[in-house]
Amino acid sequence: MKYGFQDLNMNALVALCHFCELHGPRTLFCTEALHPPSPSAPSQFGVALGDRDGDREGEGLTMRASCTATQRGEMCEGCRSLPASHPGFVSIDDETGIRFLSHQHPRQSQLFSVVRQACVRSLSCEVCPGREGPIFFGDEQHGFVFSHTFFIKDSLARGFQRWYSIVMVAMDRIYLINSWPFLLRHLRLTIQSLQSTALKVFDSEQVVCPQRAARINSVFSPVFPHQRSGNAARSLTSLTQHPHLWASLHSSFSLLLKACGSRLTEKLLEGAPTEDTLVLIERQTEQEEEMNCGEGAEGGPKSKWHQNETMTVPDIFFDQTKLEEITGPKFRSLRHLRQVLGVAEFRHLAWHVLMGNQVIWRSTDPGLIQSAFIILKSLLPVGCVRSIPYNGQYEEAYKCNFLGLSPDVPIPVHVSSSEFSVLVDVSSNRNRLSSVLSDDSVSSWFQFNISSANTQATDRGPTLLNKLEVALSNENLSMDVVFHCLLCLKEEWMNKVKVLFKFSKVDGRGREDTQKLLVLLGAGEEDNVRLLKFWMTGLSKTYKTHLMSAVRGGERSPSQ
């Protein structure tokens, strides 16, 4: 059975490349992923292939360099990782049965050619400014490459350093581009480990025999050129003094391929992606970019970013799994929240959520607040949610529209007197004497006081809330059905938001025409207009950019 490049589960392989001073770019080490033809037995991670006689004989998994005899003859110590007689390494993922195989070259001549070209380009023409860092290149025929070049210290090399690169080759361009932040973060860890280890060896060698002074003293000596050429072939194992270097790289590359494969999965979507999907993708990209920036800095900025991440990233949208992870008293669903707070108080709170007002909860139980926010945020598009689950001080409304606080945090006067905020104070029920939690532990253990300076009636609209309450009050409908009803309602009103944005913001229509459009959409009432304007802030950047670029490009329909 043949294993082509497109037969791989993750359509990718990783290789370590080196620029030899005598022979030019050379592939040192390559790790690829293969599906076994039959279910494989459990195996320890990182065992040598030579210890698996059955696999070696029955399936032909013995790793041999795919280069010709002439190429092998041209190899020097610096061009070689494992000897030709070495069987290589294999690791088996017990969950998927995928085998990660490592040797100096890929097993197939086709893959050898692809990796060889990626190696040459990564160490010659396709380099970033400064010759050290990541770059992306490739085409449909030879595959796409994520390459990260770097230097390793060597006291005997020209310029006291040698040039290496780690390349990831794949046929899927989108896969590599989407994996850029992830690959960059993990490859940098491997590279920094190699560089730090080699630096220690370099410093120790310089202490014994300072090469800079020796070269200056022997610059006019005719023996010096021969010494340099004789030291050109120095292996990476010699530079790092790592006895198990290749086994370590095999583990690192195998884990990288496994993590990459499990990180990105394909999902079948019916129709175009929703706004929530686009916003989630944009947020994930932004977070990965910020993480990479944070890793490049030291000290305060990095730790500050991680602190903000823990406060704002969790619970972007309703997820039953996240509710189940919360221990102690908690809200279980929208219907449960409505039962605990009461019909009138629930509607009052939900109205503020849909209008975009700041919702503040104060309680000694962070889990209770988190469960409430997970449920309430399901009423909104993902792009409209800015949440701080629990904090020790008040944060302004432009930072978050969901804010959890401890009971002793004071609310500023301008917030408590504002009609654009609602406060939910949670206090313990002192009349509860039993220490055993009942089925409805929230109503048994806590009392809720909802207050707001808003004087506008909340019992008329918006239309979405009216329809949602009809579904919640119908006990014959399960919460799963109610949840899907809510999704349909949100999608309906998000489509109205898109029409309003295109009509008013992109086309620049006047107020009178906009009002006529709102009536046509069935959203002429004040509460519906406020909902649409707030939800407009949650549109994805992708959608806005597409509309704006269409206008600038002068795109018109065929009828025009």
Image (cartoon, rainbow, N blue to C red):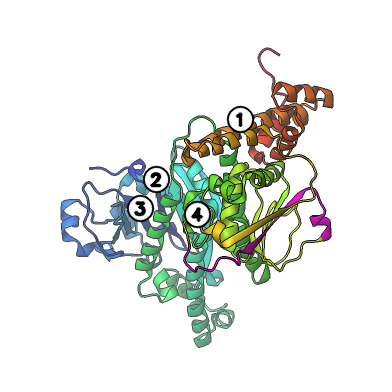
Q: Which residues are magenta?
A: 413-437
**Residue designated by label 3:** 32
Q: Earlier in the sequence, mark 4 or mark 2?
A: 2
Element at badge 4? helix
Residue kind at label 1, given as amino acid type: Glu
Mark toward the start of the polypeptide (4 vs 1): 4
Q: Nearer the viewer, residue 249 or 108?
A: 249
Q: Which residue position is annotated with label 1?
A: 492
Q: Is residue 176 left or right of residue 242?
A: right
Q: Nearer the viewer, residue 121 or 138?
A: 138
| Cα distance in 3D space between marks 4 and 3 | 36 Å
Q: Residue furthest top?
A: 559
Q: Residues within 10 Å of mark 2 (few under 14, many from 20)?
A: many
Q: For residue 322, which numbered disc appears in the image?
A: 4
Decide which of tag 4 and tag 3 comes sooner along the chain.
Answer: 3
49 vs 521: above or below: below
Q: Label 3, secondary structure: give it.
A: strand
Q: Nearer the viewer, mark 4 or mark 2?
A: 4
Residue 238 visible? The answer is yes
Residue in front for this viewpoint, 9 or 468: 468
Q: CA distance from mark 1 to mark 2?
A: 39 Å
Q: Is residue 125 visible?
A: no
Query: Which element is circle 1 on?
Result: helix
Q: What amino acid does circle 4 point to?
A: Lys
- Residue 479, position as x, y percentages in the image: 49, 41
Is disc 3 surrounded by few (<14), some (14 to 19) or many (20+) residues within 10 Å? many
Label 2: which secondary element: loop
